[in-house]
Image (cartoon, rainbow, N blue to C red):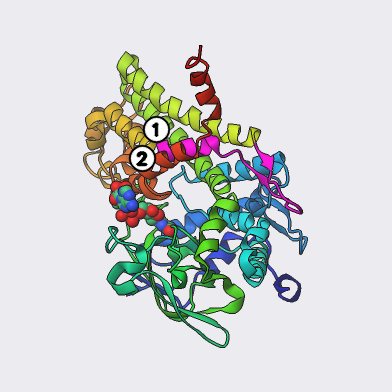
Amino acid sequence: MATETKQTTGARTGEQFLAGLKGEGREIWLEGEKVTDPATHPKLEGAARSLARLFDLQHEDPETFLFPSPDTGQPVNVTHVQPKRREDLERRRVASKRIADATGGMMGRTPDYLNYTFACFAARADVWARYGNEEGARNLVEYQRLMRDNDLSLTHTLINPQVDRSVAEADQLGGEISLHKVGDTENGIVVRGARMLATLAPFADELAVYPGSDLRLQDAKYAICFSIPMDTRGLKFICRDSYSSRRDPFDYPLSTRFDEMDAVAIFDDVEIPRDRLFLDGDPQLHSEVITDSHWRAHIIHQAMTRAWAKLEFAFGMAHTMAELTGVNSFDHVQEKLGEMWTMMELTRAGVIAAEAGSFQAEGDGIDDWVPDERSFVALRGVMPKWIPRAIELMQLVGGGGFMTTPSKADFEGPMRELIDKYFQGRNAPAERRVRAYRLAWDFVGSALGGRGELYERFYLQDSFRMTALAYLLADKKHPTELVEQFLVD
Ligand SMILES: Cc1cc2nc3c(=O)[nH]c(=O)nc-3n(C[C@H](O)[C@H](O)[C@H](O)COP(=O)(O)OP(=O)(O)OC[C@H]3O[C@@H](n4cnc5c(N)ncnc54)[C@H](O)[C@@H]3O)c2cc1C
């Protein structure tokens, strides 16, 4: 067993996390350059530091963040817990909320996201072991121990590239585009193709691949799940432009800190060692592992906790702007602020409702405590609309104030006296007003702000299909009974 024979780190410090990201073996390409050390790269260092801060946070507040590893006894992050009771759900949510609060919800893929995923998969090894996949299920359980006990940071990539969505993924350009298996080796399998996006790639130790869409039964070679180190030979990432502004944090308070980066993952004949292979060639199992492991309920627990923090942050910014210019004295502005508060509160209520209705998964020997997913399915459909709506409402509250925002250099230059006079807020000095509006602009209007909006629209698939799914999953029994009682004499 990996955890018995290898030394483990337990919960890491920020410094340990950053040291682990260095290496010539990684092929992460950013604006034409290979990145070998994100922690010192001028376009990545801000986010690297913010993530390192989250690793340090767990040592500053062990009561919130740490619990003893069931295998090693070392303190490990509580977001790796396999919940056995409602209190476990609440405890990991408190930790995730602290993480989301520390980043204003701006980083969607802080490592707790995949910690929930693999804890959920390992707790349901029985599902992964179906149809003779016992070895894959064992590998997965071992892997979850490894990531938990070494505090690994993971990225994941689920969706195949957008070459032609009108045909099955396996049919795109003769089947060569989507990630697929091309052969077996003595030690494992070889895979080729690409996956559309892996957020957090420069800041990850490992890359996970698991199902993101259903496959046809004839598409067995596309049914593969595994996790591998980022420096695995043949694994390459091409990043989008960096939005991490090299300006002073005064000017871009969020872009300088929270650009978590997105990258296309290319598998240029990558060998996946057998002990890192969780599923190999079974499209039926590929579609069952997500639904039957209750992954949706567990992952949306993390996702809506972060969304709650992000809506709180947005509401806080809108309220601060409105106070600074006095526009919250107008009833229609109050209505807009009230709408933002409502979205935030309904998200909080949805998270608590899912915990309140949580239950023990059914089945012999199964020990998995699952959130009630109904409020999560509802929120998953509306959140891609709510956060863009919150952004729109912030624009309507802020008006042209976003454009009356001199930079730090202006504050330090000869115009300071005039700025202090003409850029004041209501009962607030110019610097406070400008800082608040610059912060809000980094949320609603900067390159990072635009990316954040797109992320919320799509990171859990689109709102259209998710809301349709809400209808398909809905328990229609009682609503139908209410109707039926009036359809008979
Ligand atoms: C910022 C960002 C970060 C991301 N990070 C990750 C990540 O870390 N890991 C990861 O795996 N994925 C990631 N994703 C990808 C995300 O999972 C996809 O964006 C999402 O699944 C939607 O797929 P798509 O972008 O290919 O859009 P498409 O599926 O191409 O959709 C584009 C439009 O076509 C419509 N459409 C497409 N197909 C259909 C259909 N069959 N029926 C009806 N309408 C359809 C959609 O509704 C939408 O309006 C990220 C996306 C973004 C924007």
Question: How many marks do you count on the picture?
Answer: 2
287 horizontally vs 87: left or right: left
When the figure is inspected, residue 64 is found, relative to residue 156, above or below; the finding is above
Q: Residue furthest front?
A: 489
Cα separation between marks 1 and 2: 8 Å
Picture residue at 59% right of the left edge, 56% below the top: 115
Badge 2: few (under 14), some or many (20 or more) residues near its Cα, within 10 Å?
Answer: many
Callout 2 secondary element: helix
Q: Position of residue 379 (x, y in %)?
A: 47, 36
Q: Position of residue 246 (x, y in %)?
A: 33, 57
Query: What stretch of residues is rendered in magenta?
Result: 358-383
User: Was residue 14 drawn as part of the magenta stretch in this picture?
Assistant: no
Cβ–Cβ under 8 Å for marks 1 and 2: yes
Q: Which badge, 1 or 2, comes first in the chain's sequence? A: 1
> Considering the image in quadrants, where does the N terminus appear?
bottom right
Residue behind mark 1 = 317
Picture residue at 30% right of the left edge, 68% below the top: 172
Residue behind mark 2 = 439
Q: Is mark 1 within 8 Å of ligand 1?
A: no
When the figure is inspected, residue 368 is found, relative to residue 172, above or below; the finding is above
Q: Residue furthest top?
A: 489
Q: Nearer the viewer, residue 423 or 413?
A: 423
Which of the 4 image quadrants contains residue 275?
A: bottom right
Callout 1 secondary element: helix
When the figure is inspected, residue 40 is found, relative to residue 380, above or below; the finding is below
Q: Position of residue 215 (x, y in %)?
A: 44, 62
